[in-house]
Amino acid sequence: MTASQLQGFLPLVLLLVVGYLLLVRPARKRARATSNLQSALSPGDEVMLSSGLFATVIDVQDEIATVELGPGTVVRVHRGAVTQIIVDRAAADAENSGGAPSDVPENTGDDTPEAD
């Protein structure tokens, strides 16, 4: 191959490298982060599901997470439905074990409006 033929392939090689850097690499990074998040689920975590619902994790077994959407409303969802951990209870408990006040407000049940 001559130098002029190699120069013809240079734009194609550059296009492939740029495509990898702009498309493939960030997608893999997002997938890895989502996988790590879903594997870190533990009971007590407040999470957001892919449907936009907020819930509290009650139990996690294999690929199924049992979550509570509200008082008395317990559903089972696939672990993949969890898109975000809002409050990680294990991390919050470890952070607060030093005697610092909790940043996570406790739900006392007093915030429900009373019927007139």
Image: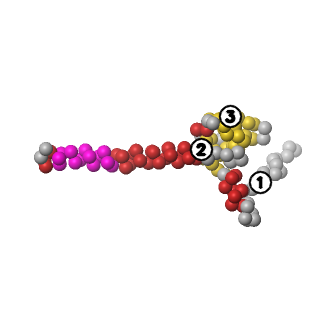
Q: Mark 2 highlights which residue?
A: 39
The magenta segment is 6-18
Residue visible at 78% across and 41% down in the picture: 71
1 or 2: mark nearer the eye: 2
Label 3 packing within 10 angstroms: few (<14), some (14-19), many (20+): some
Residue placed farthest to the front in the image? 62
- Could you say which disc has been placed on residue 76 in the image? 3
Measure the alpha-carbon separation of dots 2 and 3: 16 Å
Left-right relation of 5 to 91: left
Q: Mark 1 highlights which residue?
A: 106
Is label 3 in a helix, a strand or a loop?
Answer: strand
Q: Position of residue 82 (x, y in %)?
A: 61, 41
Check if residue 9 falls in the magenta segment: yes
The part of the image, by quadrant, that contains residue 56 is top right
The type of residue carrying mark 2 is Ser
The type of residue carrying mark 3 is Arg
Is label 2 in a helix, a strand or a loop?
Answer: helix
The part of the image, by quadrant, that contains residue 102 is bottom right
Which quadrant, please, contains the N terminus?
top left
- Mark toward the start of the polypeptide (1 vs 2): 2
Residue visible at 44% across and 48% down in the picture: 26
Check if residue 37 falls in the magenta segment: no
Q: Position of residue 28 (x, y in %)?
A: 45, 45
Residue placed farthest to the right in the image? 116
Which secondary structure class fits the magenta region best?
helix
Left-right relation of 10 to 77: left
Q: Position of residue 64 (x, y in %)?
A: 64, 35
Measure the alpha-carbon separation of dots 3 and 1: 24 Å
Q: Is residue 53 above or below residue 98?
A: above
The type of residue carrying mark 1 is Glu
